[in-house]
């Protein structure tokens, strides 16, 4: 494939935008090469500036559960735009989407809309600290909760008590309040809580991890977290920015039957427009301004175009009884096909899958946490990535990302993908 125009556009972009991109993973740093500049997208496909067509497994990193340019979302945005794009006043639409979201998500009474997943997680943590009157939080190595200071803490080796910032600009003062635990390791969490008795406000987790590849929780892990939180007056925060309205209509809370105290949303909830949200029971949500003391605000929060897109999306997800099953069946089919293709060619790999999330790791052992995910062969992944790209299949440019299956993908698309994997497997 030719990427002439993308290369030229990237060159121009780099002169006025740091690294040529507005979000770092888009820059292909982990896999090498030049990023592809998108021109348009429809259904399962994205088209670049050179006129190439790709079967898309990134789907804007999650939001496009029903495919690109989903007509009800596009129509809703166009209609709303004609009525004005922002008011800074409450609208009926905000109540409508809030009612629908609250009815779909278990264990929450109220929801507040913000502009991104980052904002949702950042606000959830402030709310948890204000509500519990404690400062520390526990997060898990390899889980991503957006780019706010408290979450940009890297894993040290072994069990680390105090996080060290992995981005300059995050102060030691902030980092010391973020404790790091190993995903799927409840004993590690208990140790941290014990060592910081009475100081932990919240445990925040991706209840199905999606930012170190796809890593489902092992049996009993989320239940264990719930028990530890209940015993220590700690709030359990499910960051469902990726999984919300995707793995089930009510997210992982519904899928696994575990209640969180605060739930964060993003991606699907905005239907492709910049939306995030966080939700909880009344007693917690009423701690927020203007009712309570915890301040949180946003000039464009609840923006009518964003809410129109989100509402159209949630309505579609809510009303389509067969959706989750269809998505899971497609993902299972792709899993089986790719596993066969890789096995036939003796390519060492592990595939993780749950619902419409799937990831291929070129690793020998089971991938259950960040450490095991990091053992994947990155050179093999790079070859695989570029091979797929040349076959017209767009997967995330990093071995630590999940692929997203959309309802727009046909079995023909999946077969085309599997055939490409088979051809590339011979070269790995
Ligand atoms: C994408 C993501 C975020 C951050 O959302 P943004 O909209 O990119 O700020 C937070 N948490 C999880 C689990 C995510 O996948």
Image: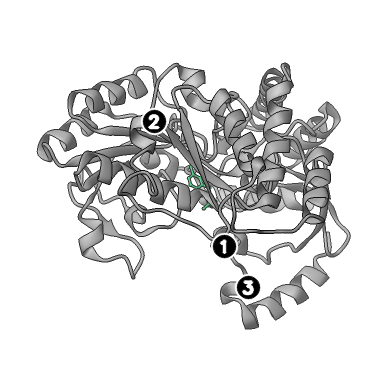
Label of residue 20 in the image:
3
CA gap between label 1 and label 2 equals: 35 Å
Query: Where is mark 2, residue-wise?
Result: 282
State which mark lies toward you, 1 or 2.
Answer: 2
Question: Where is residue 380 shown, x and y percent of the image?
Answer: 58, 48
Q: Are marks 1 and 2 in contact (CB under 8 Å)?
A: no
Crowding near pointer 2: few (<14 within 10 Å), some, many (20+)? Answer: few
The response on whether ligand 1 sits within 8 Å of label 1 is yes
Q: Nearer the viewer, residue 225 or 336?
A: 225
Q: Residue placed at 46% from the left, 18% from the top?
A: 256
List x then y, in percent, for residue 361: 53, 38
Q: Is residue 35 above or below residue 392?
A: below
**On the picture, is 84 further left or further right than 257?**
right
Residue 249 appears at what percent x and percent y?
Answer: 60, 24
Q: Nearer the viewer, residue 137 or 307?
A: 307
Corner quadrant of residue 21: bottom right
Q: How is the image coloured?
A: one colour
Q: Which image quarter: residue 58?
A: top right
Residue 23's label in the rendered image is 1
């Amino acid at each position: 494939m030719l990427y002439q125009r993308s290369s030229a556009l990237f060159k121009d972009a780099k002169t006025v935008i740091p690294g040529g991109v507005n979000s770092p993973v888009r820059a292909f740093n982990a896999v090498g090469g030049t990023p592809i500049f998108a021109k348009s997208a429809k259904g399962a496909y994205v088209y670049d500036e050179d006129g190439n067509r790709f079967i898309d497994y990134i789907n804007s990193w999650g939001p496009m559960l029903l495919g690109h340019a989903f007509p009800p979302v596009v129509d809703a945005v166009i209609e709303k735009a004609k009525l004005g794009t922002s008011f800074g006043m409450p609208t009926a639409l905000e109540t409508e989407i809030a009612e629908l979201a609250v009815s779909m998500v278990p264990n929450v009474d109220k929801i507040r809309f913000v502009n991104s997943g980052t904002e949702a997680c950042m606000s959830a943590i402030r709310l948890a600290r204000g509500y519990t009157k404690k400062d520390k939080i526990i997060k898990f190595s390899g889980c991503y909760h957006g780019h706010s200071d408290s979450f940009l803490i890297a894993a040290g080796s072994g069990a680390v008590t105090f996080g060290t910032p992995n981005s300059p600009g995050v102060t030691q003062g902030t980092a010391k309040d973020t404790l790091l635990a190993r995903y799927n390791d409840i004993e590690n969490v208990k140790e941290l809580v014990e060592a910081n008795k009475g100081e932990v406000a919240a445990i925040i987790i991706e209840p199905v991890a999606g930012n170190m590849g796809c890593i489902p929780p092992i049996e009993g892990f989320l239940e264990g977290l719930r028990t530890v939180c209940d015993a220590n007056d700690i709030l359990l925060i499910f960051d469902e920015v990726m999984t919300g309205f995707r793995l089930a209509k009510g997210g992982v809370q519904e899928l696994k039957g575990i209640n969180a105290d605060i739930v964060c949303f993003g991606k699907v909830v905005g239907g492709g427009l910049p939306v995030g949200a966080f939700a909880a029971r009344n007693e917690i949500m009423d701690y927020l301004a203007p009712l309570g003391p915890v301040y949180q605000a946003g000039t464009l929060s609840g923006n009518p175009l964003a809410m129109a897109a989100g509402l159209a999306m949630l309505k579609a997800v809510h009303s389509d009884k067969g959706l989750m099953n269809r998505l899971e069946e497609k993902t299972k089919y792709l899993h089986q096909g790719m596993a066969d293709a890789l096995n036939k060619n003796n390519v060492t790999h592990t595939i993780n899958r749950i619902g419409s999330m799937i990831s291929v790791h070129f690793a020998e052992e089971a991938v259950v946490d960040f450490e095991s995910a990091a053992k994947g062969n990155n050179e093999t992944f790079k070859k695989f990535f570029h091979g797929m790209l040349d076959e017209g299949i767009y997967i995330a440019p990093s071995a630590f990302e999940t692929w997203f299956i959309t309802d727009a993908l046909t079995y023909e698309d999946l077969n085309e993908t599997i055939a490409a994997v088979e051809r590339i497997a011979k070269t790995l």
